């Protein structure tokens, strides 16, 4: 047997089984360095981050080496500075603080400018649209629906050009700050069954819906006389924004689903229902105290300019 003498002899461990030698090759250098580097990494990581579990707690990293400081707000609104060892929750708080600080300059700008100026500032409107969308989804969409289109018998559509309580910036702002609750009284005890039918026919005639002309004529007299509807809805039945009495001539309905009713009888029933039961259940909550003034102002511009073509 010829032996390759050029290759250096491989070291053996000295172990031998039935003539088979156990060799002792050195580990490749790349592997050895890889190992040292991971050890060094683990050591540095252990110094900086929470690492080893110990009973009910864990090592938190060397104090001062990788601490986080953030501002936390407690339920009663008090702000405190907190410094802790590195952890995911505090990291999140730090990022939230940064986002808030970045937003603050925009909110401050909205707060300091008159409504109409805000709507003319394209950069600011971009912020109004994105922040407004989030605020709307979080606070308003549960009632007004995701697209602000409202829901019949529940909440008004905010995307149309009709405003029960007025569509100027100031009026929308008043709506948001103080909330609204329209009070349409029940006429069950005031009018007879026949009179209710007559008044309902008159209401239908106002928006060109099918109606009994003779009954509507009697209803007209009731509306402008004994029943006193005109006192709230106005002699022209166009409503008053100050009290949110509905405009009965614009084919936009909130409580009587006239549009949704298929037959003339069903339409009449819808109006009769409102006259008999009144309409007091729609409550627009007040937002002052729940949202801060800058948020309410921003939402006012959002509702006026981005949702509903304000009048
Ligand atoms: C609890 C349900 C509810 C929530 C939440 C709510 N609204 Fe309303 N909103 C209503 C109802 C109901 C009305 C109608 C009140 C009435 O007819 O008297 C209304 C009326 C309004 C009006 C007046 C519409 C008009 O035609 O004049 C505006 C504007 C408005 N809401 C905006 C908002 C905004 C913005 C938010 C979020 C900050 C919001 N609403 C949250 C139920 C709600
Ligand atoms: C005290 C004031 C007041 C009087 C009087 C009054 N209304 Fe109303 N009416 C309202 C208000 C406010 C609303 C809106 C309620 C709301 O949205 O919460 C309303 C709503 C309605 C609606 C529902 C409109 C819709 O969009 O669905 C009809 C119909 C209506 N009134 C008809 C009448 C008729 C007819 C009379 C007289 C018989 C009358 N009202 C008397 C205040 C009044």
Image (cartoon, rainbow, N blue to C red):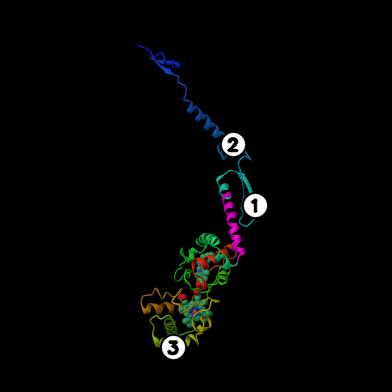
**Residue 16 position within the rendered picture, expressed as x and y whole percent measured from the top left:** 41, 15
Residue at image mark 2: 47
Closer to the chain start, of discs 3 and 2, is 2
**Magenta region: which residues?**
94-113
In the figure, 247 relative to 144: above or below?
A: below
Closer to the chain start, of discs 3 and 1, is 1
**Residue 34 position within the rendered picture, expressed as x and y whole percent measured from the top left:** 50, 30
Left or right of 1 on screen, residue 286: right
Disc 1 element: strand
Q: Residues within 10 Å of mark 2 (few under 14, many from 20)?
A: some
Residue farthest top in this picture: 1
Residue at image mark 3: 218
Foreground residue among 118 and 166: 118
Residue at image coords 63%, 48%: 82
Residue 276 visible in the current orientation: no
**Residue 163 position within the rendered picture, expressed as x and y whole percent measured from the top left:** 50, 73
Residue at image coords 55%, 32%: 40
């Amino acid at each position: 047997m010829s032996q390759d003498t050029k290759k250096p002899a491989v070291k053996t461990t000295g172990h031998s089984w039935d003539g088979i030698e156990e060799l002792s090759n050195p580990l490749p250098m790349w592997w050895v360095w890889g190992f040292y580097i991971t050890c060094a990494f683990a050591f540095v990581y252990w110094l900086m981050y929470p690492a080893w579990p110990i009973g009910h707690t864990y090592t938190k990293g060397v104090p001062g080496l990788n601490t986080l400081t953030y501002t936390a707000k407690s339920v009663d609104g008090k702000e405190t500075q907190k410094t802790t060892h590195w952890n995911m929750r505090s990291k999140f708080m730090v990022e939230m603080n940064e986002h808030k600080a970045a937003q603050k300059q925009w909110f401050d700008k909205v707060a300091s400018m008159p409504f109409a100026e805000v709507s003319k500032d394209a950069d600011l409107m971009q912020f109004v649209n994105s922040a407004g969308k989030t605020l709307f989804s979080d606070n308003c969409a549960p009632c007004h629906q995701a697209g602000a289109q409202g829901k019949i018998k529940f909440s008004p559509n905010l995307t149309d050009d009709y405003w029960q309580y007025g569509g100027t910036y100031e009026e929308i702002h008043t709506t948001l700050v103080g909330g609204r609750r329209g009070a349409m009284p029940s006429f069950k005890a005031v009018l007879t069954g026949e009179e209710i039918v007559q008044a309902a026919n008159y209401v239908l005639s106002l928006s060109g819906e099918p109606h009994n002309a003779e009954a509507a004529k009697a209803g007209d007299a009731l509306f402008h006389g004994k029943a006193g509807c005109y006192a709230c809805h106005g002699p022209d039945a166009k409503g008053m924004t100050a009290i949110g009495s509905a405009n009965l001539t614009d084919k936009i309905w909130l409580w009587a689903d006239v549009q949704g009713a298929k037959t003339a009888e069903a339409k009449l029933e819808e109006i009769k229902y409102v006259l008999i039961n009144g309409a007091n259940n729609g409550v627009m909550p007040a937002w002052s105290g729940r949202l801060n003034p800058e948020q309410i102002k921003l939402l006012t511009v959002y509702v006026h300019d981005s949702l509903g073509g304000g009048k």
